[in-house]
């Protein structure tokens, strides 16, 4: 006699869990919307190209220059942390300032890193 009631309860429980699941997937969808707005706000290609060398430039050329850090882009450990082990391997590393010693103007104020002239 009470069986239909139990079934009704189960059906209700199932539909409730479905609603909960739907609510979860809705929550998951929200961050992706935020991501899209972040990437669209980030896109400022003109500024990026001016400050940093494009990929594939000749190392040591005028184009190989990080405007932001005033060092050759191919040697800019702040833009490309992958370079750090190579500097450490040659003992060209200032642990205190997190820079290659040859780029550390704090320890070596005499260092002048000059951008190569155009056409070199
Ligand atoms: Zn840089
Ligand atoms: Zn230093």
Image (cartoon, grey):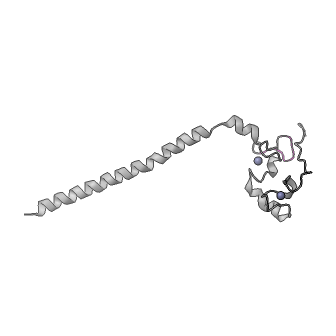
Quarter of the picture containing the C terminus is top right
Q: What stretch is highlighted in magenta?
A: 56-62
What residue sits 12% from the left and 60% below the top?
A: 4
The picture places residue 11, in percent across and down from the top left corner, at 21, 57
What residue sits 54% from the left and 40% below the top?
A: 37
Number of labels in the image equals 0
- Magenta-colored stretch includes residue 57: yes
- Magenta-colored stretch includes residue 39: no
**Does residue 75 appear left or right of residue 42 in this picture?**
right
**Does residue 76 appear left or right of residue 112 in this picture?**
left
Question: Is 54 placed above or below 79 here?
Answer: above
Query: Which quadrant of the figure shows ligand 2?
Result: bottom right
What residue sits 83% from the left and 47% below the top?
A: 72
**Does residue 43 appear left or right of residue 11 in this picture?**
right
Quarter of the picture containing the N terminus is bottom left
**Does residue 26 appear left or right of residue 40 in this picture?**
left
The picture places residue 82, in percent across and down from the top left corner, at 74, 57
Q: Which residue lies furthest to the right in this view?
A: 110
The picture places residue 112, in percent across and down from the top left corner, at 90, 47
Residue 67 location, quadrant: top right
């Amino acid at each position: 006699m009470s069986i239909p009631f139990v079934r009704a309860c189960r059906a209700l429980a199932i539909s409730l869990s479905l609603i909960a699941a739907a609510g979860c997937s809705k929550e998951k969808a929200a961050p992706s919307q935020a991501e899209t707005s972040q990437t669209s706000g980030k896109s400022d290609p003109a500024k990026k190209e001016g400050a940093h060398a494009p990929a594939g430039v000749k190392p040591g050329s005028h184009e190989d220059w990080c405007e932001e850090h005033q060092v050759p882009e191919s040697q800019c450990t702040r833009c490309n942390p992958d370079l750090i082990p190579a500097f450490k391997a040659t003992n060209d590393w200032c642990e205190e300032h997190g820079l290659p010693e040859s780029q550390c103007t704090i320890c070596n104020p005499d260092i002048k890193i000059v951008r190569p002239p155009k056409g070199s």
